[in-house]
Structures are given as structure tokens and as C-alpha cells.
Image (cartoon, helix red, strand yellow):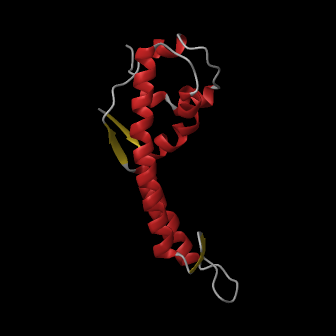
């Protein structure tokens, strides 16, 4: 079980996608697949919650486009701030994932190039090696 902030899961999605396209030993591939399955479920739930926040606080809606503009063209700053606050609260939520951490040595066994920023975004999937 790993506990991680929702924002960390969102930030890791592109790198997890990159890992999903990389050949690796089967034991790591199955663990990465499990991590992706778990995070995809969390991201879907977040997208639903995000949409609910927009529906709750927006002034108007045209299809999938939510607006915080009043009829006079000015921004309803109070509603926009409330929506941003609600979204920030969502992003700070701690999420429990039913996954096992991966050893740092796994990344060394895989031919993948990632930047330090990308490495930071997936740091939570790794077991700390002391």
C-alpha cells in the first residue's frame, strides 16, 4: 500500500505512460502495469470530481466548456476563487493505492531516458532504499 497526494499522481501520468511503452523484465512490467491501472482509476475519479466542481461553481456552460464570465463579460471572481480552492483541496488529498513500491534498481535495468524532473514526478512509486 502506498499513500500519495493526488497531485503527485497527476504529475506522474506522463512518465508512467513513457514507462508503459518501454520494454523491461516481466516482473517490473507487471508491477508498472498495476501502478498504471491503480492511478488510472484515481485519475478518472479526479476528472469526475473536477467536472462536478466546475458544474457547481461556473456561471454558465456550453457543452463541455464551463465559464466564469457574467453576462456583462466580467469574471465572477468569487466563483472562480471558490472553484480554484475546491480544486486545490482535491489535489492535496492523500490517496491510498493498492500497489507495491518498485526498487530503484528497476529503472537501471530499463533502457529509458528521463529527465530529473520526470524522475522526481515518479519518485513516489519507488521503495526507499536505506
In-image side of 6 versus 97 (left or right): right
| Vertical placement of residue 26 versus 67, above or below | above
Q: Nearer the viewer, residue 60 or 79?
A: 60
* Quadrant of the drawing holding the N terminus: top left
| Vertical placement of residue 87 versus 22, above or below | below
Q: Nearer the viewer, residue 117 or 111?
A: 111
| Residue 2 position in % (x across, y down) | 33, 33
| Vertical placement of residue 18 versus 70, above or below | above
| Residue 85 position in % (x across, y down) | 48, 64
Within the image, what quadrant is residue 129 found in? Answer: top left
| Vertical placement of residue 60 versus 88, above or below | below
Residue most extreme to the right: 73
In-image side of 122 versus 94 (left or right): right
* Quadrant of the drawing holding the C terminus: top left
Does the rendering let one see residue 126? no
Q: Nearer the viewer, residue 51 or 81?
A: 51
In-image side of 99 versus 71 (left or right): left
Number of marks present in the image shown: 0
Does the rendering let one see residue 17? yes
| Residue 94 position in % (x across, y down) | 35, 46
| Residue 17 position in % (x across, y down) | 56, 34
The residue located at (41%, 37%) in the rendering is 37
Amino acid at each position: 500500500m502506498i499513500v500519495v497526494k493526488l497531485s503527485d499522481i497527476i504529475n506522474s501520468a506522463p512518465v508512467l505512460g513513457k514507462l508503459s511503452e518501454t520494454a523491461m523484465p516481466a516482473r517490473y512490467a507487471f508491477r508498472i502495469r498495476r501502478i498504471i491501472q491503480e492511478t488510472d482509476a484515481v485519475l478518472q475519479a479526479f476528472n469526475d470530481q473536477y467536472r462536478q466542481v466546475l458544474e457547481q461553481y461556473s456561471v454558465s456552460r456550453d457543452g463541455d466548456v464551463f465559464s466564469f464570465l457574467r453576462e456583462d463579460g466580467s469574471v465572477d471572481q468569487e466563483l472562480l476563487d471558490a472553484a480554484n480552492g475546491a480544486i486545490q483541496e482535491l489535489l492535496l488529498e492523500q490517496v491510498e493505492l493498492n500497489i507495491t513500491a518498485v526498487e530503484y534498481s528497476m529503472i537501471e535495468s530499463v533502457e529509458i531516458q528521463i529527465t530529473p524532473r520526470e524522475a522526481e514526478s515518479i519518485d513516489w512509486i519507488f521503495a526507499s532504499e536505506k
